[in-house]
Image (cartoon, rainbow, N blue to C red):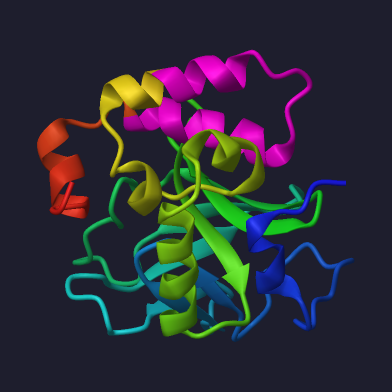
Amino acid sequence: MKRFLLISLLVGFSLNLSAQTIANWSKWFDGNDLYVVSTLTNGDLIFNPSGLVEGNHYFSLRKVDNIPGEYILVPHNYTDDAPFRAQYGWRVQYIRKEGMYFLRVLNNFDETVWILVLTPDSYESCKGQLQDAFTRDADWMLSNYLMSTTYISRFSKDRLREMISTLQEISPRSIIEETNLSLIKSELKVVESQRTLLNPTK
């Protein structure tokens, strides 16, 4: 059985595995900032950023009726810009599969553009785990680590194409491999200037 790098994020964390909704006060890390969920009076879920990352802001998810684990990305305030790499109105899926618990934001081509992973940890601990991920072999990570835009922005597009070729040869793919493949494909469409903004040390 695979040992996933992010499985430690879930150890000791109390989850209602039968529920199809996102828990109030749960924490989600996207590779850049940590968000805490609270419920608004209209039933929307607001994601509150840690405040430790400059420029990040609130956003909300609205439940899609009759589709378990399906949400729509909506603004918390009408003046808010959409979160990085996303647009309001795009689908968000709550994935709970193979020991992984995460949100994936899908563009109009059903490509994953943004990942938020459920975690019990602090912002500092999450960033430390990401730094550890940077030291590991990228090809191994393709099958054992749920990647984020922060993680893959450090690679050139030529290297991302090599990763795609590696993942396309794997059959059947795990949920980690499937999601990484989708995320990397969407990253290839991002202009280089936006990728450099996310990872200025690249």
Question: Percent x, y for residue 62?
Answer: 54, 61
- In the visual, does 23 lie left or right of 77? right
> Magenta segment: does it hold 114?
no
**Residue drawn 64% across the image and 13% down it:** 169
Res 55 → quadrant: bottom left
- In the visual, does 26 lie left or right of 95? left
What range is drawn magenta here? 162-187
Q: Is the residue 120 above or below the residue 175 in the image? A: below
Question: Percent x, y for residue 102?
Answer: 62, 57
Q: Is the residue 22 above or below the residue 161 in the image? A: below
Q: Nearer the viewer, residue 24 or 130?
A: 130
Furthest-left residue in this view: 193
> Can I make out residue 108 in this image?
no
**Residue drawn 75% across the image and 18% down it:** 171
- In the visual, does 176 lie left or right of 127? right
Q: Nearer the viewer, residue 56 or 117?
A: 117
* Picture mark count: 0
Q: Nearer the viewer, residue 39 or 35?
A: 35
**Residue drawn 65% across the image and 45% down it:** 144
Q: Is the residue 103 above or below the residue 192 in the image? A: below
**Residue drawn 59% across the image and 86% down it:** 25
> Magenta segment: does it hold 174?
yes
